[in-house]
Amino acid sequence: MEEPRIELNLPEEPTELRTDTRSFLEDSPEDGIRLVDAGYPLAGFLWEEWGVELEEAGVDRERFSEITRGYASEIRLWTMGERPWNHCVAGLAGRVLRRLPRQRERQEIASLEMCR
């Protein structure tokens, strides 16, 4: 049986967030890279957009942040203007969707949480 699929809407580009992050990267490259490697600026921004759907699908904020951190090089390219927003956000959405727990895994996790 095929797993039910969720859809992640692709939000408008947060241009001010991108501009601020780019300025920080240019002014303080080492600190800026550490910040982007930690998932900034998209982990928090996209959790606000996608968090409800992801939690219903079995992905908590910590797991989402892990996935976002794994996409840091693409986020950095978008921040610096070397990747268009739609490419960056669609790529991250696809990465997240490919890492959704399967229904059986979600049921096992829910059972374990009830036992705590």
Image (cartoon, rainbow, N blue to C red):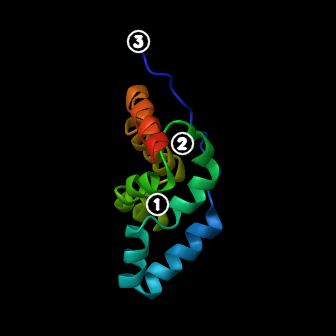
Image location of residue 114, percent across then percent down: 49, 40
Q: Residue at x 59, y 43 (%)?
A: 10
Give neighbour class at mark 1: few <14, some 14-19, many 20+ (Cα, 10 Å): some
Cα distance, mark 1 to mark 3?
37 Å
Image location of residue 32, percent across then percent down: 42, 79
- Residue 22 drawn above or below residue 50: below
* Secondary structure of the residue carrying numbered label 1: helix
Where is mark 1, residue-wise? 78
Q: Residue at x 46, y 87 (%)?
A: 27
Image location of residue 8, percent across then percent down: 57, 38
Cβ–Cβ under 8 Å for marks 2 and 3? no
Q: Residue at x 38, y 32 (%)?
A: 105
Kindly give the residue lying farthest to the front in the view shown.
Answer: 115
- Residue 79 drawn above or below residue 61: below
Where is mark 3, residue-wise? 1
- Residue 70 drawn above or below residue 94: below
Q: Earlier in the sequence, mark 2 or mark 3?
A: 3
Give neighbour class at mark 3: few <14, some 14-19, many 20+ (Cα, 10 Å): few
Question: In this orientation, which residue lies closer to the viewer: 55 or 78?
Answer: 55
* Secondary structure of the residue carrying numbered label 3: loop
Image location of residue 86, percent across then percent down: 53, 47
Q: Amino acid at mark 2?
A: Leu
Q: Earlier in the sequence, mark 1 or mark 3?
A: 3
Q: Amino acid at mark 1?
A: Trp
Q: Amino acid at mark 3?
A: Met
Q: What mark, if any, has residue 54 been given in the picture?
A: 2
